Amino acid sequence: MLVRLIYASRPAKNIGISEVSQIMSVSKHNNQMGNLSGALIYTEHFFMQCLEGDRNAVNEAYTRIGKDDRHTDCVLLRYEHVDFRIFGQWSMGQISLGKQQNPIVKKYSDHGYFDPYTMNSNQSELFMHDVAKAVTRQQQTATITNIRN
């Protein structure tokens, strides 16, 4: 049974890009072993992660993630049975929103900056779908550009 889980958390103090890279490396390995897919969206103030896969594997991963002291305030935003993966091409994608204004963020934020704690369950799902579409478009554009060169 395929499920999708979306949660938000806050990075622990003093977590830097090197630690995020380490998290990503371990996550990719663990997710490949568990046949999970997903993406981690992050800023200096927030994490938002989507995990997709078999229910037991997703539940085990979320339990493990909840015990990780590199983040705090872990809140489940959405958990549902699904028919398809939106991040099926990634064992764990890494998306840094930085400080730039992002049209997807503006669409789901009343205040113009990324804060997953303000999203309801449906908004978190739609946000992830929009992010996946944007990433796919960017990858296709990069592929087309690379072919031309």
Image (cartoon, rainbow, N blue to C red):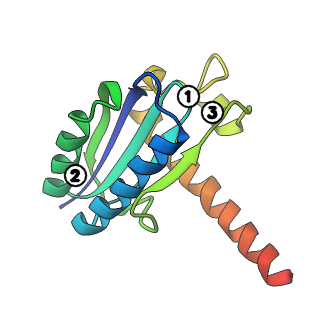
Q: What SS does tag 1 mark?
A: loop
Q: Earlier in the sequence, mark 3 or mark 1?
A: 1
Rendered image: mark on residue 58: 2
Q: Quadrant of the N terminus?
A: bottom left
Q: Please give the name of the residue rendered at 86% of the width and 81% of the height, measured from the top-left corner.
A: 149
Q: What SS does tag 2 mark?
A: helix
Three-letter code for the amino acid on which mark 3 is drawn: Val
Three-letter code for the amino acid on which mark 1 is drawn: Glu
Q: Position of residue 131 (x, y in %)?
A: 57, 48
Q: Position of residue 95 (x, y in %)?
A: 56, 47
Three-letter code for the amino acid on which mark 2 is drawn: Val
- The reply, left or right, for residue 64 in relation to residue 26 is left
Q: Nearer the viewer, residue 16 or 88?
A: 16
Q: Earlier in the sequence, mark 1 or mark 2?
A: 1
- The reply, left or right, for residue 86 in relation to residue 142 is left
Q: What crowding class fits label 1: few (fewer than 14 Cα within 10 Å), some (14-19), or many (20 or more)?
A: some
Rendered image: mark on residue 44: 1
Q: Which residue is mark 3?
A: 105
